[in-house]
Amino acid sequence: MRLGFLYATLCGLVLAGLVHIVTVLAIPLLSETDALSRARGSETLDHPQRLYTLSTADDPAPAEAWLPTPDPAVALGVCAYDLDDGPMRVSARTGAQMLSLAAHGRRGAFYAVTDQAAIRGALDLVILTRAQYDEALANEDENEPSRDVRIVAPERQGFVTVRVIAALPSQRAAANEAVQAVSCTIDSPGEEPGKEPGKEPAK
């Protein structure tokens, strides 16, 4: 009798644990207000959507709806993408303030790079599917190798966060401007890797 009770209790605990794990893992997929869903509002823009703007003497920082504890010294923007539309290109010009780009899928971040990877003051992060990556390599001119940072995404939909640090209060306005100066575009099939991309809005 005791053995049967222990066996039933153990089975109940295992089943409860499995249900809990499945529920937790399913939350990002079922939620309509996860980070990816909220970032999709930037798909029609060719520059990052503002997520957190640093306060200046003339412009206080706005209340942000889905950033519980933003860093008061980091300006933040986001560019969403759908690789069914083509490779996503995020282009930034580096300056005196530290800039970083981080690529995210629904399951979290999968790549990050800082302005230390820039070549001659330019940083181009290109996110592709495996097929798009192979096509880019096949079309590349051996005499003019691409300077792009190419990353194969684990999922077709995702977003890139743009962060610029303001070490001093006097640098906050410049940090806000640096985030908005970043370009988010879709590489069309006819464009050659490493060439200036078109200005088609990112989707």
Image (cartoon, rainbow, N blue to C red):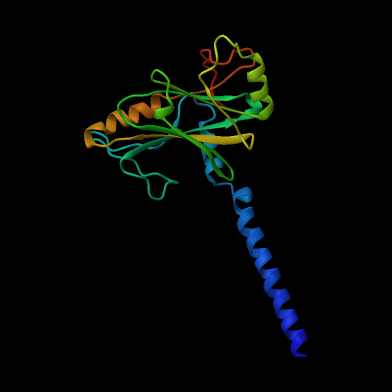
Closest to the observer, 55 or 115: 115
Residue 182, by quadrant, is: top left
The quarter in which the N terminus is drawn is bottom right
- Residue at the limit of the structure toward the top, as seen here: 143
Above or below, 194 relative to 110: above
Judge left or right: residue 189 versus residue 115. right
Closest to the observer, 93 or 38: 93
Above or below, 84 relative to 37: above
Q: How many badges with numbers are in the image?
A: 0
Residue 181, by quadrant, is: top left
Closest to the observer, 3 or 80: 3
The quarter in which the C terminus is drawn is top right
Residue 110, by quadrant, is: top right
Residue 74 location in percent, x, y? 34, 39
Closest to the observer, 63 or 184: 184
Residue 12 location in percent, x, y? 71, 75
Q: Residue at x 63, y 37 (%)?
A: 154
Residue 55 location in percent, x, y? 28, 38
Judge left or right: residue 133 versus residue 162. right
Q: Residue at x 25, y 35 (%)?
A: 56
Above or below, 199 relative to 171: above
Above or below, 146 relative to 161: above
Residue 71 location in percent, x, y? 35, 44
- Residue at the limit of the structure toward the front, as seen here: 143
Judge left or right: residue 41 versus residue 51. right
